[in-house]
Image (cartoon, rainbow, N blue to C red):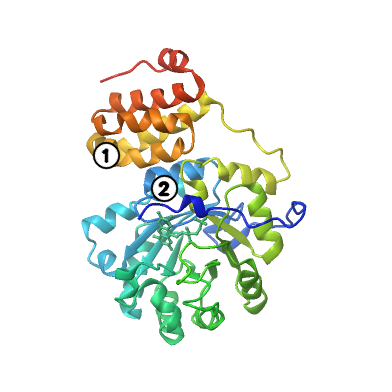
Amino acid sequence: MGIPFEKLTPPKWGGQIPGPVDWTPLELGPRCVLDPPVILSPMAAVTNPPFRKICRELGAGLVVTEMVSDKGLVHRSERSMAMVDLQPDEAPVGVQIYGKDPETMAEAAKVAESMGADLVDVNMGCPMRKVVSSGHGAALLRQPERVRDIFCAMSEAVDVPVTGKTRAGWEKTDVIDVACAMEEGGAAALTIHGRTRCEGYDGHVDLAVIAELVRSVGMPVIGNGDICDWQSARRMFHTTGCAGVMVARGALGNPWVFREIAADLRGEPIPPRPTPEKRRATVMRHIELYVDSFGVERTSREIRKHLLWYFRGTPGEKALRRRLSGLETLADVEAALDAALSANEGIREVAAKSHPRGA
Ligand SMILES: Cc1cc2nc3c(=O)[nH]c(=O)nc-3n(C[C@H](O)[C@H](O)[C@H](O)COP(=O)(O)O)c2cc1C
């Protein structure tokens, strides 16, 4: 399934952009202070170490791994270890775990903590059929008692905060029961994507259900859904009273969204869009981090989607698509990047001079 970018539309304003946000850093634990409380969402096959690092460097107050299976962590499977692979300089960083058995979840949380997690998060929102049909992800939305047991076991097992990420409900917006169960189990915070499991990505995110949750529970609530710039972040903070915001699709190809939201929260001028040179430098850094983590072969395969996201909707996207099938070496990747930049801005010569190509 492709990423539903076309559905990433900020809620209708219905008036002026709200004024500055009254916020404080979100302290979830001694090692986990979110300053600013602006978080990179867990995203499967996306929030790996290179992308997490880029987003941290550009202002995210917390980054989270993609969802990792509890059993994979407990058995320390190579695949799960590689998904987590926490780096000291990305802290604070959370590990998101999916599972349904309290004891295994508690064991998995211990493994994540031993790997350096500053927070462990429980996936209670994944809508994918193969995930929910085995009782994981959003299936937990229909089992508040199990949720309580999972949080009790995990909170007992680790010293770092245990949080959960949900949708607004399964079919109806009835997440409050689950949220209360989490709280009883010792959850430190809850992130809510304001759509039900059945809605997928349709329509606008329901800010009213997030606001209701904020009023109904004592723990901090983090608002998620359709945030793609400082205005939509403000809207989320103001309309819901949430303690923090989480960004997923809005960061794909646009990690600069974090410094934009961070600057707005701090009352600083909104940074201008990155110049082509700065854009190139960030994309190159992303590629270099990717190579450090995964080697050239995997990078040239996996970086394609990121490159397409960086140039989505621009003339560069077309130029890039023409070269994607031939990406094998780093030089190919860099040449494709320059072709895309050149199609956008005509800066090929400048870029070539400042970055002589290697093999
Ligand atoms: C490619 C992709 C992968 C995702 N993987 C996860 C995941 O592993 N765990 C999770 O809790 N949510 C996952 N999500 C959901 C997002 O974290 C987020 O809740 C959702 O996209 C709504 O936020 P947005 O409007 O900012 O995109 C994923 C979303 C996308 C687009």
* Residue ranking furthest to the bottom: 145
Q: Which residue is mark 2?
A: 88
Vertical placement of residue 313 versus 111, above or below: above
Vertical placement of residue 284 versus 29, above or below: above
203 horizontally vs 139: left or right:
right
Q: Which residue is mark 1?
A: 301
The percent coordinates of residue 206 (x first, y second) are 60, 67
The percent coordinates of residue 183 (x first, y second) are 54, 79
Task: Assess whether mark 2 and mark 1 are in contact (beta carbons under 8 angstroms).
Answer: no
Quarter the N terminus occupies:
bottom left
Compare residues 357 and 187 and report the one nearer the observer: 357
Report the Cα–Cα distance between label 1 and label 2: 26 Å
Disc on the earlier residue, 1 or 2: 2
| Label disc, if present, on residue 211 of the rendered structure | none
Label 1: state its secondary structure.
helix
Judge depth for marks 1 and 2 and give the one in front. 1
The three-letter code of the residue at mark 2 reads Pro
